[in-house]
Amino acid sequence: MSHLVLIAEDEPHILESLQFLLERIGLRIATAHDGAQAIHSIQELRPALVVLDVTMQHHSGFEVLKRVRADPELSATKILILTAKGQEADRRTSAELGADKYITKPFSNKDLVAGVRELLGMEDS
Amino acid sequence: MSHVREGFRIRKARKLQGMTQTGLANNLGISVSYLNLIEHNKRAIGGRLLNKIAKVLDVDLTQLAGYEDARLVQNLTDLSGDALFRDLSMEDRGAQDIIGREPGWGRAFLRLHSAYLEASEIVEALSDRLNRDRFLVESSHEILTQITSIRSFAEILVEFDDLPGDKRQRYISLLAGVSSELSETAKGLFAFMDEVDMTARPMTPAGEVEDFFIGHHNYFPALEQAAKTLRTRIEVGGQIHDRALADYLVERHGVALRYAVPEREAATGGARAEFRSPTRIDYQRIGDHLVLQEWHHSETVRFLIAQFIFEREHSDILSTLVADERLTSDDARGRARRALARYAVGALLFPYEPFLEMAEEVRYDIQVLQQRFGGSFEQICHRLVTLQRPGSRSVPFAYLRADPAGNISKRFSLSNLRLPRYGGACPLWALYRAFLSPGRIVSQRVRLPDDQEFLFVARTVDKKANAYGAAEKIYSVMIGCDAIYADRLVYGVGKDQARGNLVTEAGINCRLCPRPDCEHRAYAPNPAVTN
């Protein structure tokens, strides 16, 4: 069975394009529209990878990241942070909180898909 | 109130009357030579003669006595303390001369300075607004989100030519729709920017030094390495004691340590050490002695000896660092050099890896770090703000030091906490609350108007000379970090609002804070903040 990826993003258009892209490379997709939903879905579904937007309602992406990293049962979960902020402080926070990768919006689809493949150990198509 | 010499005013009033010195002197019953001395402020005169002069010259006594002018002189004298003029020689008598001879110019200068202060506040408000304004923050986020959508769908349409017709049409429609939204967002942003015109550039040497340190992220690998190497030559048993420093000073530099007591300095027979004040932290080199004030605390003594050694052995590194285009004056370069030397001493006394490791282990408990490394509260806080080696960083802190009047004398931020550039900070901050509990650590969780939360830790520090009856100098020192790091600090325990603990609703300072109902508001907010 292919990997399950959770996309946590509160912008519906971006969520739609991400879902399209990742389903095209054979991944199963679950979605969350805010931080609280993301935490719940991660605990329930145990995805292999979470594509996590930072600026969400009801817990920011950093809060979600902290919770995931604090849970030993989720230690294998890969996390790719997606954010509009490109500031040094956010890059540093992302790394310190344990994100596996950090991509700044606006991103190219190619970079995003390559990042996901890399984190899931998938070969390039 | 400054004494304003009335001689100039008497001379001016006499000339306005078209009277000669001889004429006035005769009317007053005094000699011409005495009147000349009075007019050139070589003689002070009593109220009776001044009263007589006022009557003869038919002028108001208060105008002649200069009560209003005395106030102007005081204002001008106070102004000379502005950091903007620090590198200029401005003697008090200059203010008296200006007001005495040309009070109009003096008033013009005061008005200009007042306008400059107001303009600076507006610039700071606008600068802060651009960084914090909700509209701008949200607009920026909207634009990036819209561009992300457009780019992603456009790339999908180009790359995937096997898209079903309905999906292709949907994505094309989405592109058109989001492009339209982007246009509107951009229009709104440009309209906003048309109303704003700001450049906030540091004008003072202190501001240049701040920007220089921020530009380096308060981390100087050359100084860290030099300090690390120097430590291996000084330390004994892994520690740097006062004795080890003093011995190194003699063996390596042929300089002996001497402690100065002012009453005894006169009896030394040689050059006397003269310190400006017992609380001033500095040293003097006299012959082959390094002279420190006897009353300094041991942590200060250790620091000063280490600073002297580092400056002697690594002057080249300091010179290279201050040859930076951000430092545009000798004053700025001198300040930066001294600050870099103090940075290096922090690196020497609190070595990077062991200090960071211990800080993480004890969850940044400053008092524990003081015990383990032998530094003062301020020295430990200072070091905590420098732990920014890539790949091995501490929690990113901001650092502030203020006096009881609220004046901020040191400020630095590596966190996303914006610090006020002019004037004091919000009176609700722990920085000031610490003065209510001298010597005790005050910790606080603060929410700013943009909903960002921070953890503050503050304590007063006493710069009093270590002797009975000595003058006191008290500051409050504060470090702060984004509340996201609260669980890594021992001070963050119990500061989580989710557990029902209080969060202080605060601002940056009154001028920049839009909270209309704050009971602690000292100034009306700048209109640029509330518009």
Image (cartoon, coloured by chain):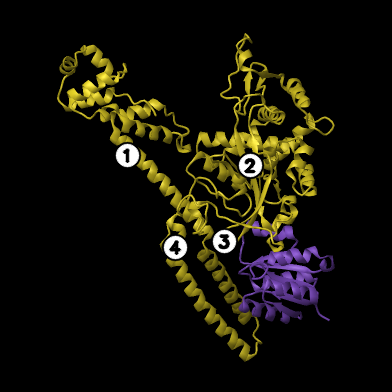
**Of the residues shown, which amino acid type is indicated by label 3?**
Asp
What residue do we see at 62% from left, 91% from top?
B165
Q: Closer to the N terminus: mark 1 or mark 2?
A: 1
Identify the residue under disc 1.
B108
Res. B141 mark = none
Q: Is residue B63 left or right of residue B313?
A: left
* Quadrant in the picture for residue A37: bottom right
Colour given to chain A in the rendered image: purple
Q: Closer to the N terminus: mark 1 or mark 4?
A: 1
Image quadrant for the C terminus of chain A?
Answer: bottom right
**Of the residues shown, which amino acid type is indicated by label 2?**
Val
Above/below status of B262 relative to B337 = above
Image spot of residue B389 (x, y percent): 71, 48
Q: CA distance from mark 1 to mark 4?
A: 33 Å
What residue do we see at 22% from left, 22% from top?
B53
Q: Is B382 or B245 nearer to us in this picture?
A: B382
Q: Secondary structure at mark 2?
A: strand
Q: Chain of mark 2?
A: B
Please name which of the two marks, 1 or 2, marks the residue nearer to the observer.
2
Q: CA distance from mark 1 to mark 3?
A: 40 Å
**Of the residues shown, which amino acid type is indicated by label 1?**
Ala
Identify the residue under disc 2.
B477
Please name which of the two marks, 2 or 4, marks the residue nearer to the observer.
2
Q: CA distance from mark 2 to mark 3?
A: 25 Å
